Image: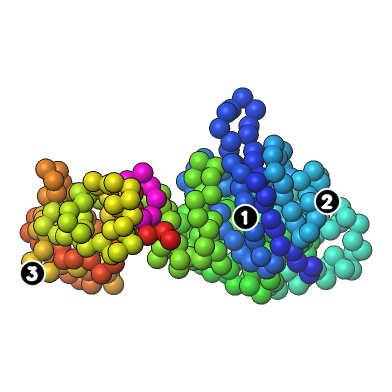
């Protein structure tokens, strides 16, 4: 299979009758053979960005490249891409094999070669026993694999996937997600994958691009997004359960939450001074907090038991208001609702300007 890198250069889409772009000057390089996930809440522009690459959306400004070819004005059928959508769009009257080979038939690929490619895709996707069945006799997960097979047999330069797993139940979604990531690694085809589910994004993507309101917020490996979110939006969006985010007053050399003082390092201290901030947004992941004998005291509101771990929601008094902090503890905890506990100084803290930027971004 020929492969290709994909490039968005200042690609912009403004829907008629609106002022604000759905995708605003998107610059993004996707490497040859990479699985890049576009993630963001609904309305963030991720599906529009994918459709711009597919040729299904007009590009108002900038351009899109596949390999070294400018495809901005090339019709979808000539872009050498294959799409997998959320709805499987299979032909109900045709067998699985016929569904998978349909696009090849349209292209005039000889019958023997068609059969060979369909068989190969069926083997990769564990669909061999089902080739003669009709879609209605398949489960949702099997239908989704047939839709994948239809894309694979075409041997495109780029796969485009738009929320392909969102119609599956939770357990099947996790299983199919793993199979899909493995499949992409084996085929090595450049893949752009859209989802609103950040867990899916983090577990599948070689890199993840986070969008909000049509603007790219950050693109990096899952590990880096988690470790160093570029701004408040990414901090709150990536991670499950979400990062604790609290606005805190700047005190001598740090920020204070309840009875806890969180010291700034030199970079943050200089940045706080430069910006003249009297308040910063503090971000702490639940696993970086612990319950201790003395610290910021608070009352337990809820304990979420997940077996191997539990999440304790603690209401801490802070500057005449209550803040809820979520703390990860080991499973089978004896802590219960109504207990008074103490939250200790965290292992790792992220500091942001309340307007959004990370303060030690340098």
The first of marks 2 and 1 along the sequence is 1
Which element is circle 2 on?
helix
> Which residue matches tag 2?
78
Question: Horizontal and vertical percent for residue 355?
Answer: 36, 44
Question: Horizontal and vertical percent for residue 87?
Answer: 62, 48
Question: Horizontal and vertical percent for residue 333?
Answer: 17, 69
Structural distance between the alpha carbons of marks 3 and 1: 48 Å
Mark 3 or mark 2: which is in front? 3
> Which residue matches tag 1?
28
Q: Magenta segment range?
A: 354-359
Q: Residue at x 72, y 50 (%)?
A: 64
Mark 2 or mark 1: which is in front? 1
Asked if residue 320 shows in the view, the reply is yes
Numbered tag placed on residue 293 in the rendering: 3
The first of marks 3 and 2 along the sequence is 2
| Side of 246 where 34 appears, left or right | right
Instruction: Please name whichever residue, 268 or 282, is drawn nearer the observer in this view of the structure.
Output: 268
The answer to whether residue 355 is magenta is yes
Which element is circle 3 on?
loop
| Side of 172 where 183 appears, left or right | right
Label 3 crowding class (10 Å Cα cut-off): few <14, some 14-19, many 20+? few
């Amino acid at each position: 299979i020929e492969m290709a890198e994909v490039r968005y250069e200042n690609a912009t889409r403004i829907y008629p009758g609106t002022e604000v772009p759905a995708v605003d000057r998107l610059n993004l390089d996707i490497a040859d053979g990479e699985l890049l996930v576009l993630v963001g809440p609904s309305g963030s522009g991720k599906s529009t960005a994918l459709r711009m690459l597919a040729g299904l959306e007009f590009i108002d400004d900038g351009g899109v490249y596949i390999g070294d070819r400018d495809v901005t004005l090339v019709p979808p059928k000539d872009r050498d891409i294959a799409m997998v959508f959320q709805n499987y769009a299979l032909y109900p009257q045709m067998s699985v094999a016929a569904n998978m080979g349909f696009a090849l038939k349209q292209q005039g690929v000889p019958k023997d070669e068609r059969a060979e490619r369909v068989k190969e895709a069926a083997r990769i996707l564990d669909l061999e026993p089902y080739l003669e069945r009709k879609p209605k006799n398949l489960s949702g997960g099997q239908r989704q694999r047939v839709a994948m097979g239809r894309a694979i047999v075409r041997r495109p330069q780029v796969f485009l996937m738009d929320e392909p797993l969102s119609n599956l139940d939770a357990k099947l979604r996790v299983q199919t997600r793993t199979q899909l990531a493995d499949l992409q690694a084996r085929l090595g085809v450049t893949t752009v994958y859209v989802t609103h589910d950040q867990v899916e994004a983090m577990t599948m993507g070689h890199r993840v691009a986070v969008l909000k309101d049509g603007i790219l917020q950050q693109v990096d490996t899952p590990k880096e997004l988690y470790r160093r979110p570029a701004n408040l939006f990414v901090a709150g969006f990536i991670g499950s359960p979400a990062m604790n985010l609290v606005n805190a007053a700047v005190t001598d050399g740090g920020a204070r939450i309840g009875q806890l003082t969180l010291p700034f390092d030199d970079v943050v201290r200089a940045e706080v001074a430069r910006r003249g901030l009297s308040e910063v947004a503090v971000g702490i992941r639940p696993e970086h907090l612990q319950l201790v004998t003395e610290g910021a005291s608070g009352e337990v509101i809820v304990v979420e038991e997940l077996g191997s771990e539990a999440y304790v929601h603690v209401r801490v008094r802070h500057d005449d208001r209550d803040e809820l902090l979520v703390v990860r503890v080991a499973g089978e905890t004896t802590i219960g609702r109504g207990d008074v506990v103490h939250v200790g100084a965290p292992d790792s803290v992220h500091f942001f300007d309340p307007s959004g930027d990370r303060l030690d971004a340098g």
